[in-house]
Amino acid sequence: MYSYVVARDFGFAPNPFFGWCTLATCKPEIRRTAKRGDWILGTGSADKRRSGQAIYAMCVQETMTFAQYWADPRFNRKHPNLRASHKIAFGDNIYRPDDDGGWHQLDSHHSLHDGSANPLNVGTDTRVDRVLASQEFIYWGRSGPTVPERLRSFGEAHEDLCCHNRGHRCRFDGALVAAAVAWIDSFPDRGLQGRPGDW
């Protein structure tokens, strides 16, 4: 189980549209280490008064390189077009391999205002050449439930499932992970369930 704060909820990282939840930008350490079957929980930020509120949960089903993600027809609709709907404008399939072994960054949420590549974001995103994808997810966005108190002070160690700082947490007691997955599984509706909080 990986837990982190979704500081900016635009439907970009994660991108929950068109039947797949993908994490293709930001969070390089989670993208580097998460394995198939691992769960990722993103919660809201305190500065937006959403601390402890679930934004999304996904069980990693597939991992792939940026080149594989770019070329896979299942994810063509995640190529961004800033003149289209919000769902398409915030597409996260933004890195195309170029001829010299680098990356071409599409005009996207991570580009500069003039559409040119943002070197800072290119560096952060491509530092780990790995994309996580799943059809086993719930994305609540702005309408997410509050993580139950029993998961915020769990067991004798009073372990908190929610992360409160930059980075992420992933070293949880197995019983807490099982309880967290059981809580996620208690929601009957899966997939896209709400709008991003920053729209």
Image (spheres, rainbow, N blue to C red):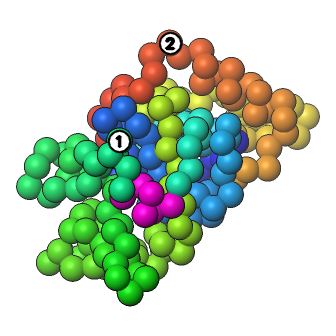
Tell me the kind of residue under disc 1: Arg
* Mark sitting on residue 167: none
Residue 152's image quarter? top right
Q: Is residue 67 magenta?
A: yes
Query: Mark 2 or mark 1, which is nearer to you?
Result: 1
Q: In the structure shown, which secondary structural element does the residue marked by tag 2 occupy? A: loop
Q: Could you tell whether 186 is left or right of 110 in the image?
A: right
Instruction: Residue 4: give x, y in percent of width and height.
Output: 59, 51
On the image, the x and y values in percent for residue 134 come to 50, 38
**Would you name the residue on which mark 1 appears?**
74
Main SS of the magenta part reads helix
- Residue 94 rendering spot, x and y as whole percentages: 32, 63
Which portion, as a residue range, is magenta? 65-70
Name the residue at 63% across, 61% down: 32
Residue occupying image coordinates x 84% and y 35%? 174
Placement of the C terminus among the 4 image quadrants: top left
Q: Amino acid at mark 2?
A: Pro
